[in-house]
Amino acid sequence: MKKEEKASVIRKEIVELIKERHRLERNLLQFLSRYPLFPATFYPIYKACNKPGCKCTRGEKHGPYWYLSFRKDGKTKMIFVRQSRWEKVKRLTDRYKRWRKIRARLVMLNKEILSLIDELEKTLRVRLKEVQK
């Protein structure tokens, strides 16, 4: 493949990645401007009371009890969430998780774009001999 053809292919790849990046950036801005986000993980915990004769002593733990796990002042904190709040908390943490996935994809796209730009530069680079002709 000639330099010009290879450069054209690389340029087209860059354009497609930039289009995807712009779409994701718009999506990310929508999240930041319209929806509250809560940077935490919402998950169930099963516990054992270990009372004699209880089912948990045979391996069937009690629960689920739903907790929020988040970082504050460099430490991981956990808070119990009442059942009446599950829906709201789940919605907030799911939004945050989705926002982080979009952000991570943007980071990867930028790396891919920069890599292609470097490849394009190498492809278009001429040797000193070609300049002196």
Image (cartoon, grey):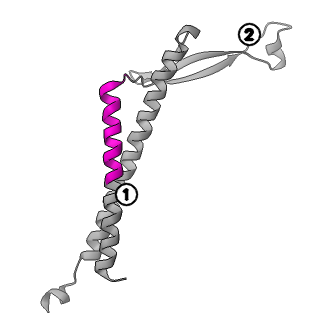
What is the secondary structure assignment of the residue under circle 1? helix
Residue 112: image tag: 1
Q: Is residue 85 left or right of residue 9?
A: right
**How would you rate the neighbour count of disc 2 (Cα within 10 Å): few for under 14, some for 14-19, many for 20 or more?**
few
Farthest residue to the left: give it.
132
> Quadrant of the image for the N terminus?
bottom left
Q: Earlier along the polypeptide chain: callout 2 or callout 1?
A: 2
- Can residue 83 be seen here? The reply is yes
**How would you rate the neighbour count of disc 1 (Cα within 10 Å): few for under 14, some for 14-19, many for 20 or more?**
some
What is the secondary structure assignment of the residue under circle 2? loop
Residue in the picture at 52% in, 11% down: 85
Residue 114 in percent (x, y) is at 31, 59
Q: Is residue 42 left or right of residue 28?
A: right
> Closest to the observer: 118 or 20?
20
> Closest to the observer: 81 or 78?
81
Q: CA distance from mark 2 to mark 1?
A: 51 Å
Residue 49: image tag: 2
Farthest residue to the bottom: give it.
133
Residue 113 in percent (x, y) is at 33, 58
Magenta-colored stretch includes residue 11: no
Is 23 above or below relative to 73? below
- Identity, as a three-letter code, of the amino acid under mark 2: Cys
Of the residues tagged 2 and 1, which is closer to the observer? 1
Q: Which residues are magenta?
A: 19-36
Residue 132 in percent (x, y) is at 13, 90
- Identity, as a three-letter code, of the amino acid under mark 1: Glu
